[in-house]
Image (tube, grey):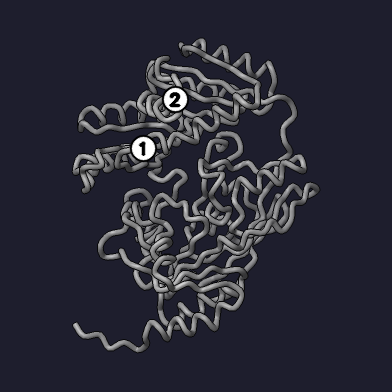
Amino acid sequence: MTVFRAFSNQEVLDYLATQVTDGQVFTDEETLKKYSFSPRLTDDDSGLALAYVEAHTTKDIQGTLKTARKYHIAVIPQDQTTSTVIGADGLTDSLILSTAKMNRIIEISKADSIAVVEPGVVNGDLDKEARKQGMFYAPDPGSKPISGIGGNVATNAGGMSTVKYGATKDNVLGVKVVLADGREVKLGGRTLKQAFGYDLTQLMIGSEGTLGIITEVIVKLLPIPLGTPVMGVAFFDNMTALAKAVTAIRISGVYPTMLEALDGNTVAALDRYEKTHYAKNSAAMLIFKLDNGGQDSMAVVKKILAEQQANDVKITTEPKEQAALEQLRRDMLPAVFAGQNHIMEDMAVPLSQLAPLMDYIQELSKRLDVEIYTAGHAGDGNVHPTLVWPTSVTEVPEKIIIALQEMFKKTLALGGTISGEHAVGMLKNQWNNAELGEDVDMLQHQIKALFDPMNILNPKRKIN
């Protein structure tokens, strides 16, 4: 079909160049391929973006959105590009808008227990700077050393410390956001309490760049706990037994900082990757941590582990040994992914349903003959089953797709969610009606239309 275009790509790029005056606009093929072309996108969407905008200021963001409105072009917000759900991959002829270079820590206020940061500040870098002043930033996603605060906010990232300190949404007090129409609005603030107006701050958290572009974030900081942190490992005959032990620890009153679960397949993969020898112990591994509470709390944990028939319990207060255990957990994904095709999932269920979900995943693996590696943040009911198949098989096998569908349906039946902390992106947006219900699904679209009537902000993500 012949299309009579009103403008050329060059006209768009020329106008964009007049609007982005502090940052840079890249149109070379190497840059566009690096940031926009993803093998995970469908054939209908795959291709190069029109331009990659490296924003340095809010003005650059506003100029990019002005261009998008003028020419009706999609804008794909990116931060540190660590999304696992096709949440920030470029679309054909879109404008990729990166805030990675907006990475200043504007303020750390010990007196107010907050930090004010730009979106490109890496989570781990903020935590390191806060610790120099006796404070710390609690959210601890597996991508902590590489993911940006802006992306963490946009996806409501969780992590290993969520069991005690909550996810990103529990640690953000305010944001500045550029809306689709170009206005920059300030939502929330520096106070620990705020009950005025609708809570638009929380609406932006987890919105995946579909309602606005984050330009500044006010996060809570906490004082480093007194005492010596304690970490340990324990082994169980299976993940169901581990899940029951986690529930007992979770409700015991000791307030653990970390309760991480790894099934036997995952432990064996880590042994191969790390050259360790954990898999010989048993079928499932629990990594736990208490950042305060002392000997009384540790005594409670030991008692529970004994009652739940844990094996080979090892406890350490040595910082190097604790760091090695934390790194072991962070290396879970590269260890599992090594040398095979994979899809990692992200479901969360009520704590009482963790053991039934573990049972179901194991049964599903046997029934469909699918190799599944299951790990996750057991303390908050969040599991990450990774389904793998040989690299020689280029298409996703049908049994993998069926297994994913069955896991999602079971998770919803148990009262859970199919996105605990990785967001929705393009991988799961067809499940909105199934998880949220028809009425709430419609409300989601109405909210999107209110904030972004031209549908230029990260289209096809979050909601379908």
Residue 175 in sight: no
Q: Crowdedness of circle 2 by 10 Å Cα count: few (<14), some, many (20+)?
A: few
Instruction: Quote the CA–CA distance across marks 2 and 1.
Output: 14 Å
- Location of residue 283 in the rendering, given as x and y in whole percent from the top left corner: 38, 19
- Location of residue 50 in the rendering, given as x and y in whole percent from the top left corner: 40, 73
Sequence order check, earlier mark of 2 and 1: 2
**Which residue is label 2 attached to?**
275
Relative placement, left or right, of 192 versus 13 is right
Q: Name the residue: 74% across, 52% down.
A: 108
Q: Name the residue: 21% across, 31% down.
A: 369
Q: Tag 1, which secondary structure?
A: loop
Q: Name the residue: 44% across, 19% down.
A: 277
The residue type indicated by label 2 comes to: Lys
- The disc label shown at residue 338, or none: 1
Residue farthest to the right, as pictured: 111
Q: Tag 2, which secondary structure?
A: loop
- Marker count (numbered): 2
Relative placement, left or right, of 455 versus 304 is left
- Residue 74 picture quarter: bottom left
Seen in the picture, residue 445 relative to 415 is either above or below; the reply is below
- Location of residue 253 in the rendering, given as x and y in whole percent from the top left corner: 62, 24
The residue type indicated by label 1 comes to: Ala
Q: Crowdedness of circle 1 by 10 Å Cα count: few (<14), some, many (20+)?
A: few
- The disc label shown at residue 220, or none: none
Residue 59 in sight: yes
